[in-house]
Image: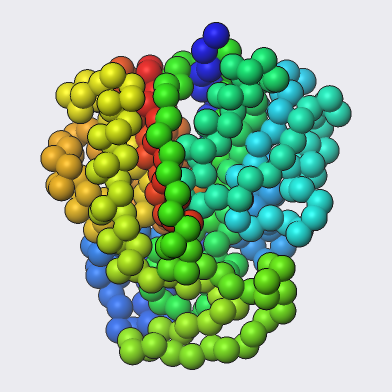
Amino acid sequence: MKAYISAINYYLPEQVLTNGQLVKEFPEWSVEKIANKIGVNKRHIASSDETSADLAIKAAEKLFVESGINREIIDFVLFCTQSPDYVLPTSACIIQEKLGLSTSCGALDFNLGCSGYVYGLSLAKGLVLGGIARNVLLLTGETYTKFIHPKDKGNRTIFGDGGSATLVSQTGFAEIGDFVLGTNGKGAENLIVRTGGAKFPNKLNDEMFGDHGNPISSDHLYMNGSEIFNFTIDVVPHLICDLLQKNHLTSENINSFIFHQANVFMLNFLRKKMKIPESKFPYYMSETGNTVSNTIPIVLYEENRKGLLKGYVVLAGFGVGYSWGGTVLKF
């Protein structure tokens, strides 16, 4: 038995934040500087009453309509998010009811960021190959912008919100290969929201400003950009090497390398270090920003819609945790 991606789609919130709007708040930036350094022209922002589950539900509804999928065949829901609607209940249970899926459908959340889509594919493949489910609806939904301090010009230029939906089944257009996964919790402090969980349930109100005037607060998203960059540059080349070896492939066999869309500077550095031709390395973040676990399925959808995916395609996610993962799709 094998597992395949049989359908994919995504949804972006209606509210948009452009570089021009950001420059009005942070005149020391310029539209061109943000576009050139980050690779983002605009990002979509969830409204105050719009949650990660809402975004995932809208992505799933698009998938059902555009791919002609009968929702009655779904027998498991996996939902990847780091911004769940509630501490409990599980957002996937709410999604099951709102999508009108069968009550015999399994449903669970899992908490991962930029590696989350790859991990989700591994879980979905395991459910299918284990005979536990036949049609797994893998959803991602993220509203990181709700965690960002309004004066944090660095993270506000990078992140956007979104949701995605992928159907993993026993048949489809892209066979899911073997996985390489990894974790190093020593890097947890370098990308973190400290408060809101069991360890620090209440806000600490400890806001201070760093050397470059950027806010540092336990109550908002903190990212040590230089440490995240160093981690990525160290781990990802080894990840790709191990992944190719495990799937009995070489880099010459790969037609596309789809990496998590962190920012253009980091991706360009990685691509050049790994000697990947630009023609094999798609980008899709200029109109969306870094949407965390949604970035890989967004690129997959857009590249597949254009008919650009063929043969072997590498997927690689990496970031918060630290966590990383990769797999190979065969089209």
Residue 31 vs residue 50: left or right? left
Please indicate, yes or no, whether residue 102 appears anywhere in the rendered image.
yes
Residue 264: x, y in percent? 27, 55
Q: Nearer the viewer, residue 146 or 27?
A: 146
Residue 187 vs residue 202: left or right? left
Q: How many marks?
A: 0
Q: In the rendered image of this protein, does residue 237 appear above or below residue 19?
A: above
Q: In the rendered image of this protein, does residue 199 appear above or below residue 24?
A: above
Residue found 19% across the figure and 34% down from its top: 279
Q: Quadrant of the N terminus?
A: top right
Residue 221: x, y in percent? 52, 71
Residue found 56% across the figure and 40% down from its top: 164
Q: Nearer the viewer, residue 324 or 18?
A: 324
**How are the colours assigned in the image?**
rainbow
Please indicate, yes or no, whether residue 68 appears anywhere in the rendered image.
no
Res 88 quadrant in image:
bottom right
Residue 288 vs residue 106: left or right? left
Residue found 56% across the figure and 24% down from its top: 125
Residue 236: x, y in percent? 30, 46
Res 108 quadrant in image:
top right
Q: Residue furthest top?
A: 1
Q: Quadrant of the C terminus?
A: top left
Residue 98 vs residue 286: left or right? right
Q: Residue furthest right?
A: 103
Q: Nearer the viewer, residue 114 or 46?
A: 114
Q: Nearer the viewer, residue 83 or 287?
A: 83
